[in-house]
Image (tube, rainbow, N blue to C red):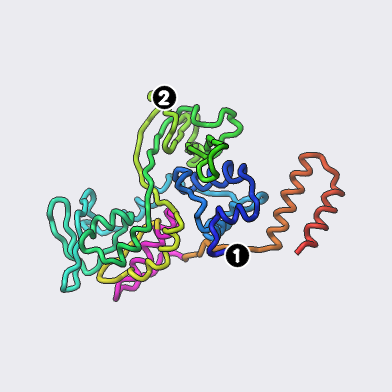
Amino acid sequence: MSDITIGDYLRKEKYSAAFINNYLIPMSAAIWSTPPDSVALDFPASTLIRFMHNHHLLQIADRTQWLTIKGGSKYYVNEIIKNMKEGTTHLSTPISSLRRLHNGTVELSTANEDKWFFDHVILATHADTSMSIINEDLSEKEKGLLSNFKFSSNEAVLHYDEKLMPTRREAWTSWNFLSNADEKSNVNNQVSFIPRTYWMNLLQSLSEENYGNVLVTLNPPLEPREDCVIGRWSYEHPLISADAVQAQGPMNDIQGKDGLSFAGAWLKYGFHEDGFISGYNAVKTINGLTVAAPFDLISPERQVDQVNAQVRFMLYILQYLRMNKVLISFVVIIASVYLSID
């Protein structure tokens, strides 16, 4: 399956258009904060399926309970900042260019035309930003690899307008989306927009009694009432495309070369954990520097357990049949038949 795209796999296995348009594309677009036309069906099937398996998205029954960090990502960012030596962090200091000098050092120029010199530089910026900083000093290999990574712009709106949530309150969940399908168009373009609204009360345990409804909508096609808007922010998120996935491995060939390394969540799936791991790996490319994480690093890769998959499937069937008041003996017959298939 390593070379087949998710689109080809779905066609080969005869998955329905309803599954593709009403589940797979909206789910993928919501996970990676991208418009659905960017979640192309030429995405490598093995990468997408592996990701969904690692995050327990393939199982119907016995789903994992997800947790969030109290206070959000700002909490652990502040914890890192507290441990930095005073005077070594320069905020609001844009870097305009980078040059690798003949003596092996790297020159950084700021927007104020100040120049700093280092033995090694880690560019923990998006690939396109890194390319613009290196600019004329960019090697052909660096340009060829970094150009595979693309990013999408997203507007996040913090508000409390309930019209961007499901009509039925019982249907509210952490992530909420609506899709608009055009059945006459081809499968790649059937879902024309997917507004995502995050229910922050549930995600961050924010009391409705104290704060009211706290909602964040990405790229709202329907603007919330202006008197309900608290703030707006613009972000860029990585597009996890086939080209990006294929370039992630070869990126190791340019890491640590000529005093330069690259880091960012775009080097994997685009999440905070991926950003951390890429930064940790970038530090390890610096010659003569020994580093160790302050905690155990556990791989998120999960093994596929066929027996457990069968048990989970049967639990789902059992739950479904109970809800529909089907005789328990019928469940036993189905279980016997299913578990005998290998």
Residue under the point 38% across and 64% down: 280
User: Residue flagged by tag 2: what amino acid is it?
Assistant: Arg
Q: How many marks?
A: 2
User: Residue flagged by tag 1: what amino acid is it?
Assistant: Gln
Of 208 and 309, the residue lying toward us: 309
Which residue of the protein is positioned furthest toward the bottom in this rendering?
288
Please report the bounds of the magenta region as a residue range: 267-296
Residue under the point 21% across and 64% down: 137
Residue 18 found in image quarter: top right
Of 236 and 281, the residue lying toward us: 236
Count residues near mark 2 (Cα–Cα under 10 Å), then give few for <14, some for 14-19, many for 20+.
few
Residue designated by label 1: 303
- Disc 2 secondary structure class: loop
- Is residue 219 inside the magenta stretch? no
Residue designated by label 2: 225
- Is residue 282 inside the magenta stretch? yes
Q: CA distance from mark 1 to mark 2?
A: 47 Å
